[in-house]
């Protein structure tokens, strides 16, 4: 099974329309990325044209002598960094398939993640605003995005602006892995990992053209293509969206792109490359009431390029080398106080990761690898600037034992060394037992994690932050136990998990510098349900109970802010006819704090939102979609002062070719 999972080439190509005027009118884009995106658009067009000329080509696959596409979605990658049967995975992991998200008309990444157990999403406003993830109560910078085999966010390269506007174009696979995961993924994976893979495709040329529109003068466009031959696969995506949001001077414009080119040179050798990027311009209107807060614009380009080579056989020995370049930028242009408050930074990283897996026996798989990163952080403002460099290298190893087709035991360890932050050692273990006759899986894991301090927190940001060379990495340890139960031969699946995490040496700003002064503890329960009682009805539900406490002072613990105690999500779909589908979803958040201390806490309002959506297939080529967000017009704020959008209506027309 492992061989088939690795060898099957799945390629879908998405390309989104991009207005040239947006490129030319965006100052940061025209300086650093406009030419790159224009060149990318030309390349994507050339690929599509070339692909059109070979529409009679056979399906692209890495399996010799097989000429039909095979889709194998029932596996997980994030739990072991290799394809693994979810029936035997000890970890708590969710797999989000693009087809399911598209059917539910989930169009952005933060909405997709917010529906998962253990995940709380907090946005400071509307589309494009800074957005954070609190997974199992961990801080927002303790959740790792792992994109195309590369750690995307670090302590210096955050994801807040990326997530605020990230769409789902060009994503082939999305997984949410919960719990400490630094053993396989390194720094920042204390709360969990979100794995994102760029689209792969196969078969004859096909694609989608989409026009979208809606409330708040929202409009956008999409063009997508995909295809391949027996040895060559390709994908590309390019998107543009614009919205004024609800407040004045609160607009957001975004361009995103992705591409994958993959060549099966021989049955034993696969080489490829991916491109991913996002460029957005967000008008920050500030919180209400404004007070002393400033208004301005944020531009935050994010670009990732990877190249990789994989050789060997997955049922024996397989080696994969990934080399990547990643750059994030952030530019704040202040409208209230002028150039005196403007700020800019850029973080550039070069990454190399070498992963090796060996099927030592039918019941033993060994994994070992090495990782190295070189990063440079530069910043400047009216008060000056600085340039800092760091280098990291790490070694990791993991083993998975599968006994008697029922027991799975995982064990792994890792060591990382940073020039600026020192050394961190982590380990992890897990156990799963499946009772096949009853469709029951019992599972448990224990692991440790760490997050290296940022270069600015360690070396300061004059004149605002003093240096602290003795700053240590943040550390955590966590465990969970749970079960997955199939009912009526898979008609319904129920999952439940209890978890506990302890964090120490947490870094907080105090007395003009960052210090390791805090500790915290989180405990909770995650519940999930999926069901298809009849062929025309699909149901999905999740619920999380979370207790998140600041334990820095053992005599006076208090709750952490922005971590709701109760979070739930529900979705139901009904295929009324062969052409018409209707669905509805509900999301609720309850018992959360806007501020908290040992003496006083300020609770913010609970909220429940409802969405309604429907689609109609006019013919094989054309589908129309319509959805209503916040259908009950709930008035609430995820962050005090930043009101969420009121009731809004969005539609789209898809043309497939």
Image (spheres, helix red, strand yellow):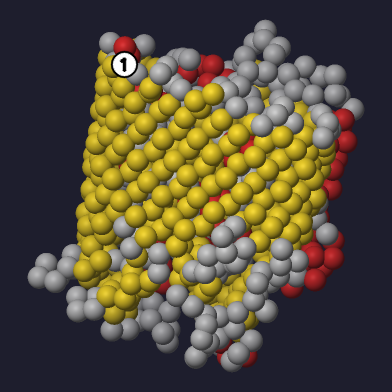
Against 51, residue 614 (above or below) is: below
Above-or-below relation of 593 to 37:
below
Q: Name the residue under label 1.
A: 438
Residue 27 sits in which quadrant?
bottom right
User: For this rendering, which residue is in front, 472 or 210?
Assistant: 210
Which residue sits at x=75%, y=66%?
A: 217
Q: Give the camera-side residue of 470 and 438.
A: 438
Depth check, front residue: 487 or 294: 487
Work out whether 476 lies above or below 310.
below
Query: Can residue 155 be spotted in the picture?
Result: no
Q: Name the image quarter holding the C terminus.
A: top right
Q: For residue 357, what is the image quadrant?
A: top left
In the rendered image, residue 39, in percent from the top left (x then y), is placed at 80, 52
Label 1: how many Cα within 10 Å (few below 14, some 14–19, many 20+) = few
Residue ranking furthest to the left:
555
Q: Position of residue 578 (x, y in %)?
A: 72, 27
How many numbered discs sit on the rendered protein? 1
Percent coordinates x, y for residue 313 in the rendering? 51, 17
Q: Position of residue 99 (x, y in %)?
A: 62, 34
Compared across the picture, whether 275 is left or right of 116 comes to right
Q: Is mark 1 on a helix, strand or loop?
A: helix
Q: Which residue lies furthest to the top in this view?
A: 65
x 70%, y 29%: residue? 577
Residue at the location (59% across, 92% down)? 337
């Amino acid at each position: 099974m492992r061989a088939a999972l690795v060898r099957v080439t799945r390629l879908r190509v998405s390309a989104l329309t991009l207005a040239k005027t947006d490129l030319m009118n965006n100052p940061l884009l025209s300086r650093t990325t406009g030419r790159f995106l224009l060149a990318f658009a030309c390349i994507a067009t050339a690929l599509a044209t070339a692909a059109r000329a070979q529409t009679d080509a056979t399906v692209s696959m890495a399996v010799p002598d097989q000429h039909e596409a095979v889709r194998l979605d029932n596996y997980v990658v994030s739990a072991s960094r290799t394809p693994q049967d979810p029936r035997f995975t000890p970890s708590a992991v969710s797999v989000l398939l693009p087809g399911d998200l598209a059917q539910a008309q989930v169009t952005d990444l933060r909405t997709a993640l917010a529906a998962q157990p253990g995940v709380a999403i907090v946005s400071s406003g509307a589309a494009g605003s800074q957005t954070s993830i609190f997974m199992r109560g961990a801080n927002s910078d303790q959740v790792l995005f792992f994109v195309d085999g590369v750690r995307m966010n670090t302590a210096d390269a955050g994801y807040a602006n990326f997530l605020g506007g990230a769409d789902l174009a060009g994503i082939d696979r999305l997984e949410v892995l919960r719990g400490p995961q630094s053993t396989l993924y390194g720094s920042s994976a204390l709360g969990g990992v979100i794995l994102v893979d760029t689209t792969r495709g196969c078969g004859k040329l096909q694609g989608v053209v989409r026009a979208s529109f809606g409330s708040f003068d929202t409009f956008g466009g999409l063009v997508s293509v995909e295809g391949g031959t027996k040895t060559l696969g390709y994908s590309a995506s390019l998107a543009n969206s614009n919205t004024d949001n609800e407040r004045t001077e609160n607009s957001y414009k975004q361009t995103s792109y992705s591409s994958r080119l993959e060549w099966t040179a021989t049955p034993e050798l696969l080489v490829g490359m991916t491109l991913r990027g996002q460029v957005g311009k967000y008008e920050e209107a500030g919180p209400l009431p404004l007070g002393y807060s400033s208004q301005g614009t944020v531009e935050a380009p994010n670009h990732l390029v990877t190249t990789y080579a994989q050789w060997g056989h997955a049922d024996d020995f397989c080696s994969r080398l990934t080399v990547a370049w990643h750059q994030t930028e952030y530019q704040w242009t202040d409208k209230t106080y002028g150039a005196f408050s403007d700020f800019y930074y850029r973080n550039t990283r070069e990454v190399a990761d070498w992963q090796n897996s060996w099927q030592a026996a039918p019941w033993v798989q060994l994994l070992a690898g090495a990782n190295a990163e070189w990063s440079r952080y530069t910043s400047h403002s009216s008060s000056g600037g600085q340039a800092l460099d760091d280098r990291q290298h790490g070694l990791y190893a993991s083993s998975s034992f599968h006994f008697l087709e029922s027991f799975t035991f995982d064990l792994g360890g890792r060591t990382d060394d940073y020039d600026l932050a020192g050394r961190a050692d982590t380990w992890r273990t897990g156990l799963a037992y499946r009772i096949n006759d009853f469709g029951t899986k019992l599972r448990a894991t224990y692991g440790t994690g760490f997050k290296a301090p940022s270069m600015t927190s360690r070396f300061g940001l004059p004149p605002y932050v003093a240096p602290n060379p003795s700053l240590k990495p943040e550390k955590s340890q966590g465990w969970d136990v749970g079960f997955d139960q199939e009912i009526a031969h898979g008609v319904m699946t129920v999952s439940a998990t209890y978890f506990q995490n302890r964090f120490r040496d947490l870094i907080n700003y105090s007395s003009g510098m960052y210090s390791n002064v805090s500790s915290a503890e989180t405990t909770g329960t995650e519940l999930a349900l999926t069901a298809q009682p009849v062929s025309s009805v699909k149901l999905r539900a999740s619920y999380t109970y979370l207790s998140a406490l600041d334990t820095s002072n053992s005599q006076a613990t208090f709750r952490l802010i922005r971590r709701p105690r109760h979070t739930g999500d529900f979705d139901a779909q009904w295929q009324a006819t062969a052409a018409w589908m209707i669905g509805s979803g509900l999301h609720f958040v309850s018992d959360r704090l806007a501020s908290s201390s040992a003496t006083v806490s300020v609770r913010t309002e609970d909220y429940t939102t409802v969405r309604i959506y429907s689609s109609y297939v006019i013919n094989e080529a054309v589908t129309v979609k319509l959805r209503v967000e916040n259908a009950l017009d709930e008035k609430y704020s995820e962050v005090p002062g930043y009101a969420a959008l009121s009731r809004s209506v969005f539609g789209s027309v898809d043309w497939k070719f």
